[in-house]
Amino acid sequence: MSGLVATRRILETLPETAVLMLSMHSEETWVRQALDAGARGYILKSAMELELPVAVRKVAAGELVLDPAVSRPVALKGERKAALTPRELEILQLIVAGKSNKEIADQLQLSANTVAVHRANIMDALGIHKTAELVVYAIRNGLVNIP
């Protein structure tokens, strides 16, 4: 389970929980997705040990904490105003892993047509027209974990 999924699940069960994401990803898309999932802070694993306790205290006090090495997230060029949905990111991860629409549908218990619609929406949102370009874009912009 990814940190984004874990954050969502934690907050569904315990919405008062203050989540501080500790990540190796400094790309703005990851920061935006973490905040969209409900994290109140985002710190890079490369942060000094002295910075982490301060960040934990600030998040616990209700403050938003972003690692100084990451900027406040903005939309990527060609990306719609709202980031890709969690389901779109999940499908994008499976596309990058080389899964077909049918394989994705079977894994996620969806119809192949629903997966095709999600794929089209992802490509439209990012302004991309070929699957190969989509895979390269997703990897270069940190939208997925490389399998």
Image (cartoon, rainbow, N blue to C red):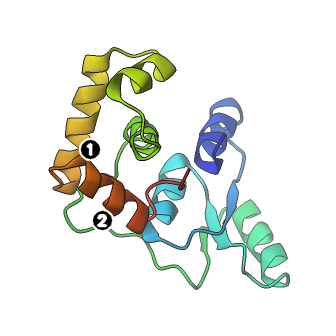
Is 37 displayed left or right of 55 in the figure? left
User: How busy is the neighbourhood of tag 1: few (under 14 within 10 Å), some, or many (20 plus)?
Assistant: many
Q: In the visual, does 121 lie left or right of 104?
A: left
Residue at position x 34%, y 54% in the image: 135
Image check: 55 left or right of 4? right
Whole-percent x, y for residue 87 in the image: 42, 35
Q: Which residue lies at the image location 47% right of the left edge and 79% below the top edge? A: 71
For mark 1, give the secondary structure.
helix
Please determine whether, in this image, residue 1 is positioned above or below residue 72.
above
Answer with mark 2 or mark 1, whichever residue precedes in sequence.
2
Q: Which residue, given by chain and number where applicable, does mark 2 sit on?
A: 75
Splitting the image into 4 quarters, where does residue 47 fall? bottom right
- What is the crowding at mark 2: few (fewer than 14 residues within 10 Å), some, or many (at least 20)? few
Where is residue 80 drawn, in percent x and y?
22, 54
Marks 2/1: CA–CA distance: 14 Å
Left or right of 48: which side holds 19? left
The residue lying toward the viewer, choosing from 118 and 95, is 95
* Image location of residue 46, percent across then percent down: 72, 80
Q: Quadrant for residue 74, please give it.
A: bottom left
The residue sitting at 75% across, 61% down in the picture is 60
Disc 1 target residue:
122
Q: Nearer the viewer, mark 2 or mark 1?
A: 1
**Image height check: is 114 above or below 73?**
above
How many marks are shown on the rendered structure?
A: 2
Q: Position of residue 38 (x, y in %)?
A: 56, 49
Label 2 sits on what residue type? Ala
The disc labelled 1 sits on which kind of residue?
A: Ile
Q: Secondary structure at mark 2?
A: loop
